Image: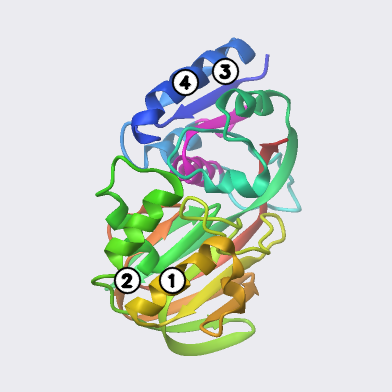
Amino acid sequence: MPRVVAIVNPAAGRARGVKLRARAAEELKRLFPAIVFLPTAAPGHAIELAREASDADLVIAVGGDGTVREVASGLVSATGPLDSLSPRPLPLLAIVPVGSGNDLLKTVGVPTDVALACRIAKEGNVRPVDVMRVEMQDAGRTQIAHFINAAGFGFDAATVAAARKYRHLRGLPLYLFAVLDAVRSYDCPVVHIRTPDFDNRQSVLLIAAANGRYYGGGMKVAPAAAPDDGLLDVCIGDGMGRLSILTKLPRFVAGTHVTLKEVRMLRTPEMELEFSTPVMVQLDGDLLDPQPFRRFHLSVMPRAINLRVP
């Protein structure tokens, strides 16, 4: 019988998460009688558990986007880079959503219904998807991490920090309340942006580097993004005043911000960012520890993992 491991985040989904996890566990036991459940104990623990489970036939992330990010990170860091001279099977990942945002699912088509997602984990198709690598530096320290949906620098990360205050909300309403909170005290930093086809130093409100189309509980930040094209879709929002931010926010939700004169969209396999002062970063909705950093190098690991999809 194939070996199946479910890595479960017991903190995901806030108040609704308890019932959703119980439902997921019941359904997964029915579909996979020999499944092994591994609960996480702290941020970052899912990375370690996924590394240990990297030889399983199927690893299921039971949680939100942050849990999926950690599991994907553990799987790709355990198996190492692809090598055409010694090909290896890609790790197989399935997602059962019990998180607050579940943004990656909106791009790849996995339903938010727990029972349906469990069934796809068992019977779904296999789609190779990209994983993003980010190297962060500041004051002589370096940290390497991965993400699978979207990373945000500066204002995005400040918004994620503000969202921790609103424990009764989830999804897009949570993100919108957090934006209103963060915008009151946020100052737009200056950053030097470099890609193979672009080089500019400017003040920015936000830089979002996306593999999926959505983040923030449903904001369509990268409408043209494809998670298997080997490219980052980068949204750069120019520095702007608080009133301008609030009036343009609905455009970011709808995905029509791409036509704003204050917005530039790039597609690139890699990107370097150097901020004038250290900024916070969020990866798939997670604020990493320690923070902040000044320099970032992002690169795509093309089709580094197999994902179960409808």
Residue for point 50% across, 47% down: 73
Q: CA distance from mark 2 to mark 3?
A: 40 Å
Which mark is nearer the camera, 2 or 4?
2
Q: Mark 1 or mark 4: name the one nearer the start of the chain.
A: 4
Q: Quadrant of residue 296?
A: bottom left
Q: Do the residues bearing badges 2 and 3 touch, measured as CB atoms within 8 Å?
A: no
The residue that disc 3 covers is 28
- Tell me the crowding category of disc 4: few under 14, some 14 to 19, or many 20 or more residues within 10 angstroms, Cα based: some
Q: Mark 2 or mark 1: name the one nearer the start of the chain.
A: 2
Secondary structure beneath dot 3 equals helix
Does the stretch in magenta take in 35? Answer: no
Q: Do the residues bearing badges 2 and 1 touch, measured as CB atoms within 8 Å?
A: no
x, y percent for residue 271: 54, 74
x, y percent for residue 63: 46, 35
Residue type at mark 1? Phe
Residue for point 44% across, 64% down: 152
The residue that disc 4 covers is 37
Secondary structure beneath dot 1 equals strand
Q: CA distance from mark 4 to mark 3?
A: 10 Å
Which mark is nearer the camera, 4 or 3?
3
The residue that disc 1 covers is 296
Q: Choose between 98 and 136: the one closer to the eye.
A: 98
The residue that disc 2 covers is 279
Secondary structure beneath dot 4 equals strand
- Tell me the crowding category of disc 3: few under 14, some 14 to 19, or many 20 or more residues within 10 angstroms, Cα based: many
Q: Mark 4 or mark 3: name the one nearer the start of the chain.
A: 3
Q: Do the residues bearing badges 4 and 3 touch, measured as CB atoms within 8 Å?
A: yes
Residue type at mark 2? Val
Q: Choose between 158 and 121: the one closer to the eye.
A: 158
